[in-house]
Image (cartoon, rainbow, N blue to C red):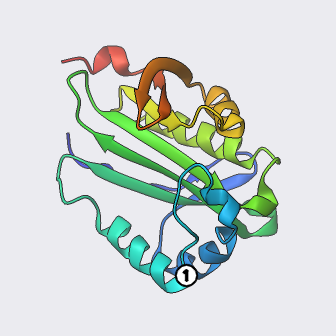
Amino acid sequence: MSPLAAQAISTSRLDLLPLDLEHAEEMAAVLSDPALHTFIGGTPDTPQALRSRYQRLIAGSPDPTVSWLNWVIQLRDESCLTGTVQATVSPSGHGPIAEIAWVVGTPWQGKGIATEAAWGLVAWLGRQPVTTVIAHIHPEHRASAAVATAAGLTPTDEWHEGEIRWEHQTRTSATHTS
């Protein structure tokens, strides 16, 4: 599998923009609420720490068979950043698999932004050579479970580090079996 690159994705209200170092300052403010880290752990990054992290993400995975794809979510009408979506695409025995995640800043939660962004990401991944999209969601994180459901993922019986594995078989999975 050749590496994938993040491309701009547009939905009805959002633009998912490939991650850029210039996003760090605004995103540090977007992600500054400690409550965002309840289920994912850690603490909010400073703009400098986030810029350093973004630099590593943009450089890509050291494994040439793995693609790190990262976007910021821009609310088009307000021309502001509201969160991020990401996908790590790696090989599996049944074709490339994408593990996705999303986070939306507290002021923009409850407005369908995470749902629309995740749906847009899953739709885009369905047009790539990806057979399965997965997400790992804490069993008490109802908002993320609702986002995953709306994006077409369903919970499985598998657990990973205290989280439930959700998955979606893309429409291209039948053509990418090994």
Instruction: Name the residue at the front extreme.
Output: 162
**Residue 150, position in %: x, y?**
68, 29
* Position of residue 143 in the picture relative to residue 94 (left or right): right
Instruction: Identify the image quadrant of the N terminus.
Output: top left
Instruction: Identify which residue is drawn at 47% across, 35% down.
Output: 162
* Position of residue 97 in the picture relative to residue 136 (left or right): left
Instruction: Identify the image quadrant of the C terminus.
Output: top left
**Residue 42, position in %: x, y?**
52, 63
* Position of residue 143 in the picture relative to residue 157 (left or right): right
Which residue is label 1 attached to?
46
| Res 22 visible | yes
**Residue 9, position in %: x, y?**
56, 50
Tell me the kind of residue under disc 1.
Thr
* Position of residue 65 in the picture relative to residue 156 (left or right): left
Vertical order, 172 against 142 (above or below)? above
Judging depth in this view, the residue of 37 and 82 nearest the camera is 37
Instruction: Identify which residue is drawn at 29% across, 62% down.
Output: 60
Vertical order, 86 against 78 (above or below)? above
| Res 5 visible | no
Vertical order, 167 against 107 (above or below)? above
Instruction: Identify which residue is drawn at 60% across, 41% down.
Output: 118
- For disc 1, the neighbor class at 10 Å (few under 14, some 14 to 19, many from 20) is some
* Element marked by disc 1: loop
Instruction: Identify which residue is drawn at 23% across, 35% down.
Output: 91
**Hey, which quadrant is residue 46 in on the image?**
bottom right
